[in-house]
Image (tube, rainbow, N blue to C red):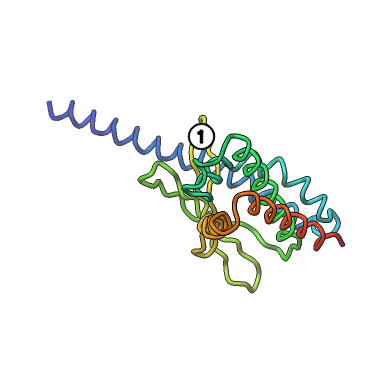
Amino acid sequence: MFLRFFSIWLLVQFTSLSFAADVAVDARKPVDRLNSVLIEVMKGGKQMGYEGRYKKLDPVVKDTFEFEAVSLIALGGHWKKLDVDQKTAFMVKITDLSVATYAAQFKEYSNESFQFQTVQELKSGNVMVSYNLVAPNEQPIKFEYMVRLVNNQWKIINIVVDGISDLAIKKAQYTSVIDREGFDALLAKLSQKITDYAKNNAA
């Protein structure tokens, strides 16, 4: 009897460990893909130019992020007040802004690399994947990616850089604009930011 229960216990433990290992591997895939292309565009830098970096990043950012979840969290209670067309317009705009931000900020290479640190399962069912962005003679920058399983694929929904949550900043800014000026004003401001990124990085 003891051996039977012990065998069952071992099987449960092995299954649990195997599942956790599978989650760790799969949850890293969108993050590794994003980090890989970020290093590529940094290496390409000036040769690619802003437009080249944007085109390289665009399909990867769209495929690795879950922008509906990002949008819902970023707008908080305002999200459910929007109609379908408004929700679609916002998701398109925040997607374009994300690509533009990466294209503008990741434009130079100084032997940086992303080094994997940990994978942590959260109570919410999401997973936090942590990396350090390291460069010679520089302090490492900690990147924590929150990923979620959506239609059997892991997608990024938030990035925390050195303890600062991108979604928390977006939510504070975006909800404030809607409260003061309305939803259309928010879309206009996001459009202007995208335009500014392109203009300031045209050279």
Residue 140 x/y as whole percent:
57, 67
* Tag 1: amino acid: Val
Classify residue 33 by image quadrant: top right
Can residue 143 be seen from the camera position used here?
A: no
Identity of the residue furthest to the bottom in this view: 137
Return the residue nearer the eye: 2 or 90: 90
Residue 120 x/y as whole percent:
42, 49
Can residue 193 be seen from the camera position used here?
A: yes
At a point 47% along the width and 42% down the height, the residue shown is 24
At a point 74% along the width and 62% down the height, the residue shown is 109
At a point 61% along the width and 64% down the height, the residue shown is 134
Residue 74 x/y as whole percent:
53, 50
Please tell me how crowded label 1 is: few (under 14), some (14-19), or many (20+) other residues with Cα within 10 Å: few
- Please name the residue that numbered disc 1 is placed on: 150
| Mark count | 1
Residue 119 x/y as whole percent:
46, 49
Q: Dot 1: what SS?
A: strand
Q: Is residue 189 above or below residue 32?
A: below
